[in-house]
């Protein structure tokens, strides 16, 4: 039995109305019913997004006559063909949400997410497809798809998976080109800000080169970075097989620490070229676009990718060893001040991404842990433990290349049960069951001291805010608050903190401490009046009722971390450090780190620089 062939046409005739016009021509139709579906999620972003809600004006015809149709569920249209062998389907898609997971169309461009745009015929996902684009005059088309012949507006895809994996940036954009390993790369930029084009290109080139040195030869013929510049709250990235969508605030490129958001996002998404776009868990093969696809390995896919983000930036020379340690310290502080790390394992965090990660709420810090954050730090501990056990003869780099060669290049997925553990044992030798049971399947504290000691790095913990002239920390609420129209509202109450012990709850409106009014401008000063162990009266509104509670200040979690090179490293520590950081051991790094405020010191309030642009806030 022959399978239908599919040709898509994408037209942008009314960009100011934020509409995309899609035509699907289906030939070799058999049977009295043709069923088409629109994906409900897009790979790399693990949330059911209900793309079908943006479809309107659906129509089906055959030889000029209208065909009857009706929806059978939220994402399925059933067309009565009347025996027709060729059917033309047309519909419009609304797109006015500027993210890397949703369509955005306006008078200057269209960023098109194929999963949110193109319907497919069940059972025909592996058939080759064609795409033609009709854009307004003067607009250009950038995508990872291969062009058909010399036509700049016609493209081919080997199957629907490749089409979904190839976003399109269509509009008035800049195209900057460079080459790595004899292969063409393009940086396509929509919008303007305080960027330096030459610097963006040069740093992207360094990232590509450094990543390739770790993971292997570039596995594509050409690659396109699609960079969109938006407002102050813009942020996000989504990887694709030979392209990536990047979204950043337009003025993020200065100062240097802010510019690191571009570097981090670019490196993270590019590393996915190997890890995620080709190396996948069994649970994600093949993609089912109609429902959740479960895996317990997102800590490897996303978390270890995040670990390598800073490694790539370091090896590319884009951050110094001191800055690497500072960023690492920030991540460790963030994890260790998150109560949920004791509740949810990395495996469970990965599995529950569909219901938790993209839907944070007031209890998230107490019940969940990010597989990005903890997965990255697990990658650190695993890398340094491998180096320790093998006397620096092997590393996590070798494990990732082994996984890639064993699974990705063989067209197989990593086994969900024990696949990574067995790979580590094959590469490094020894028994790794306890390590994976405690830190991946379990919720034991990650062994930071042991891991970093292997590279001659010592941890010094403390508190950001100390009592003036004393050696004790200043009291903390143990809650997160935010200003809300002049009121001070509790957003999160952290388990184990003073607020939780007192009985405060999310949405409480704080008004006074010991009878003195507080707001966002003076809360910190009022807390400084007290000491650990003091008991005060907190006044607050709960659903418009004024209440009072006694609150005793408990010792807060440590929120300041300094990472320093030890004074006298042994030979193994020195070799591991130099191989890991790809820089000579320098005794003066200790002096440098402690001599200025910008050294390798991190606090829990430094998250503005290190917040992962892909992670919900």
Image: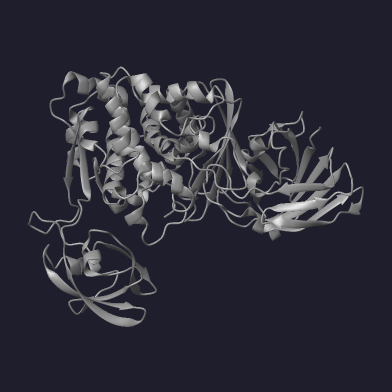
| Image quarter in which the C terminus is found | bottom left
Visual colour scheme: one colour
Residue at 53 percent across and 49 percent down: it is: 229
Query: Is 364 left or right of 266, judged from the image as shown?
Result: left
Q: Quadrant of residue 510?
A: bottom left
Query: Is 342 left or right of 290, judged from the image as shown?
Result: left
Asked if residue 400 shows in the view, the reply is yes
Q: Quadrant of residue 423?
A: top left
Q: Quadrant of residue 531?
A: bottom left
| x and y, in percent, of residue 355 in the image | 47, 53
Query: Is 25 left or right of 98, judged from the image as shown?
Result: right
Direction bottom: furthest residue: 545
Of 132 and 286, nearer the camera is 286
| Image quarter in which the N terminus is found | top right
| x and y, in percent, of residue 421 in the image | 37, 28
State how many labels appear.
0
| x and y, in percent, of residue 413 in the image | 52, 30
Q: Is residue 347 above or below residue 406?
A: below
Query: Is 573 left or right of 186, judged from the image as shown?
Result: left
Of 198 and 320, nearer the camera is 320
Residue at 13 percent across and 29 percent down: it is: 567
Asked if residue 15 shows in the view, the reply is no
| x and y, in percent, of residue 523 in the image | 24, 68
Of 109 and 368, nearer the camera is 368
């Amino acid at each position: 039995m022959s399978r239908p062939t599919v040709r898509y046409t994408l037209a942008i005739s009314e960009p100011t109305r934020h509409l995309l016009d899609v035509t699907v021509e289906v030939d070799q139709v058999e049977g009295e019913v043709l069923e088409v579906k629109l994906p409900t999620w897009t790979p790399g972003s693990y949330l059911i997004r209900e793309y079908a809600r943006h479809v309107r004006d659906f129509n089906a015809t055959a030889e000029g006559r209208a065909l009857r149709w009706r929806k059978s569920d939220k994402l399925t249209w059933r067309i009565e063909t009347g025996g027709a062998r060729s059917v033309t389907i047309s519909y419009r898609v609304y797109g006015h949400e500027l993210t890397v997971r949703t369509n955005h169309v306006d008078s200057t461009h269209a960023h098109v997410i194929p999963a949110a745009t193109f319907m497919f015929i069940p059972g025909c996902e592996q058939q080759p497809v064609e795409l033609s684009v009709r854009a307004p005059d003067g607009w250009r088309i950038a995508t990872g798809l291969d062009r058909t012949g010399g036509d700049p507006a016609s493209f081919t895809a080997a199957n629907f998976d490749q089409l979904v994996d190839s976003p399109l940036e269509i509009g008035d954009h800049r195209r900057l080109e460079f080459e790595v390993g004899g292969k063409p790369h393009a940086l396509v930029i929509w919008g303007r800000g305080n960027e330096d084009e030459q610097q963006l290109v040069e740093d992207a080139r360094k990232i590509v080169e450094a990543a390739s040195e770790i993971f292997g030869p570039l596995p594509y013929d050409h690659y396109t970075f699609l960079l969109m510049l938006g407002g102050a709250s813009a942020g996000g990235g989504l990887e694709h097989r030979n392209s990536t969508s990047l979204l950043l605030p337009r003025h993020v490129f200065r100062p240097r620490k802010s510019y690191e958001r571009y570097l981090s996002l670019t490196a993270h998404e590019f590393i996915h070229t190997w890890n995620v776009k080709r190396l996948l868990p069994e649970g994600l093969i093949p993609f089912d676009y109609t429902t959740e696809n479960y895996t317990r390995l997102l800590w490897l896919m996303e978390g270890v990718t995040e670990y390598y983000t800073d490694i790539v930036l370091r090896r590319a020379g884009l951050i110094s060893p001191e800055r690497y340690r500072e960023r690492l310290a920030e991540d460790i502080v963030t994890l260790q001040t998150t109560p949920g790390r004791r509740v949810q394992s990395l495996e469970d965090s990965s599995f529950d991404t569909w219901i938790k990660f993209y839907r944070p709420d007031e209890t998230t810090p107490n019940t969940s842990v990010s597989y990005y954050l903890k997965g990255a730090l697990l990658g650190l501990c695993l890398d340094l433990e491998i180096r320790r056990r093998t006397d620096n003869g092997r590393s996590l780099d070798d494990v990732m290349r082994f996984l890639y060669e064993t699974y990705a290049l063989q067209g197989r997925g990593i086994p969900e049960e024990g696949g990574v553990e067995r790979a580590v044992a094959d590469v490094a030798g020894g028994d790794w069951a306890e390590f994976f049971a405690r830190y991946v399947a379990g919720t034991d504290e990650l062994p930071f001291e042991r891991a970093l000691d292997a590279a001659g790095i010592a941890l010094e913990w403390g508190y950001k805010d100390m009592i003036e002239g004393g050696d004790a920390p200043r009291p903390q609420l143990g809650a997160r608050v935010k200003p809300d129209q002049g009121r001070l509202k509790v957003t999160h109450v952290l388990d184990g903190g003073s607020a939780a012990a007192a009985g405060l709850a999310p949405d409480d409106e704080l008004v006074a401490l010991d009878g003195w009014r507080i707001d966002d401008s003076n809360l910190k000063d009022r807390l400084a009046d007290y000491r650990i162990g003091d008991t005060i009266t907190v006044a607050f509104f709960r659903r418009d009722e004024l209440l009072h509670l006694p609150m005793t200040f408990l010792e807060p979690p440590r929120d300041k971390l300094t990472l320093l090179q030890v004074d006298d490293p042994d030979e193994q520590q020195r070799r591991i450090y130099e191989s890991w950081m790809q820089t000579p051991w320098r005794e003066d790094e200790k002096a440098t780190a402690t001599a200025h405020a910008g050294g390798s010191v991190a606090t829990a309030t430094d998250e503005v620089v290190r917040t992962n642009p892909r992670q919900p806030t």
